[in-house]
Amino acid sequence: MTDTIAIAVSGGVDSLVCAYLLKQQGHDIFGVHFLTGFEKSAEPGWKEVRRLFRKMDIPVVIIDLKIPFKAEVVDYFTAAYQDGKTPNPCLVCNPTIKFGALLAEVRRLGASRLATGHYARVEADQEGRYRLCKGLDKDKDQSYFLSRLTQDQLARACFPLGIWTKEKVKALAAEKGLQPVSAKESQDVCFIKDVHYAEFLIRSNNICKQSGDIVDAAGNRVGCHDGLHRYTVGQRRGINCPAGQAYYVVRIDIRHNRLVVGSKADLCTQSCRVTDMNWIIALPENPILADTRIRYRHRAVVSMVSPVGHDGAVVRFEQAQTAVAPGQGAVFYRGDEVIGGGWIVGTTR
């Protein structure tokens, strides 16, 4: 007996192929297209998406998630910059919107699971615990963005593309005549259109443009910034302070409205503190070795992860890392398996 699966559809090639694969497997399926309130008129709308899936004999339901999306994702994004942190909206959106509010809606409509076009895998072990693993396509793997899903959410998640490569997905779409509404790839900050993120923050009315000093590690003034919201730890471009060697953003001092800069060596850190941990495996009783990614495109580094209470950890890197930014997600792997992740809150030299 097959279950009913809802598919989050955008009109892109990934969701099209997801729908095709699940239908071929005999599942009872329907599409869901959710509204964020940040869609632009030039983008494919829900009518185009519904028309596209109608050709595949798949009904599409439109779900309005404007209010929770603004509250959970957009407000989080602006608040992070207000606090001098570097946010990652996808790490918040997946557990709170896609596998939070949207999953709740599709379950109300009769679906037992929600499928998305993420390149990742979910497997159940012999003890009934769900494991989150990397997608087969290492260049496209999106398990990092799913690291905050709970066991209950993973139990109802379906990722048909986890065993596919992007190249094969595109080839199948071409072979079956699955023409996407939009050829564009999804972007990390989907709600920012046509403007730089700094301008978006100003327009949100939550960020006030305020100039201040740029200082080096010793506290010497070396220039002036035009708003701390324009900078993230590790950034090199846009500092505009002439010097014998390039400056990098080392720290964002919100309290004193100062941008602290230094050399690339000043960015190196041996460890970081992580909070609000989501352990996908059972909470470790002792420090464990893991491969840690401190941002999406970061190559994981061997680390010793020491749990602190139920939701904290101290991460000590085998090799010093650069640009470990507060606000970013630290995600821990054991081979291809995601074992947990949390938010970076501080570093040590």
Image (cartoon, rainbow, N blue to C red):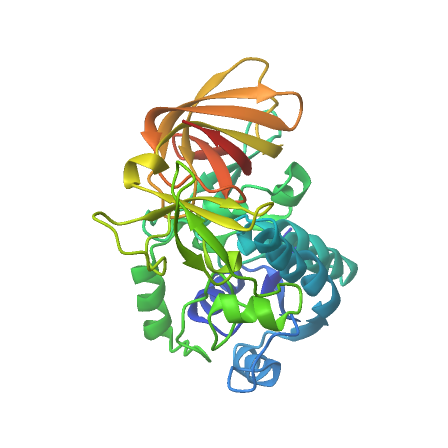
Q: Does residue 104 appear to the left or right of 172 in the view shown? A: right
User: Exactly how many numbered labels are in the figure?
Assistant: 0
Q: Observer-nearest residue: 72 or 180?
A: 72
Query: Which residue is farthest top?
Result: 286
Residue 289 lies in quadrant: top left
Q: In this view, does 122 lie above or below 189?
A: above
Residue at the image position 76 percent from the left and 63 percent from the top: 109
Q: Can residue 38 be seen by looking at this rendering?
A: yes
The image shows residue 47 at horizontal and vertical percentages of 60, 85
Name the image quarter holding residue 223.
bottom left
Q: Nearer the viewer, residue 139 or 21?
A: 139
Q: Residue at x 45, y 34 (%)?
A: 337
Left or right: 344 with respect to 98?
A: left
Which of the image's four quarters has the C terminus? top left
162 horizontally vs 124: left or right? left
Visible residue check, residue 9: no
The single residue placed furthest to the front in the displayed view is: 220
Above or below for 111 versus 31: above
Q: Residue at x 59, y 59 (%)?
A: 27
* Outermost left residue: 244
- In the figure, 6 relative to 243: above or below? below
Q: Residue at x 44, y 32 (%)?
A: 333
Q: In which quarter of the image is residue 104?
A: bottom right
Residue lying furthest right in this view? 108
Residue 292, x across and y down, in percent: 42, 32
Q: Where is residue 269 in the image (x, y as percent from the top left)?
A: 39, 30
Instruction: Give how far across and how far down residue 238 sits, in percent.
Output: 36, 61
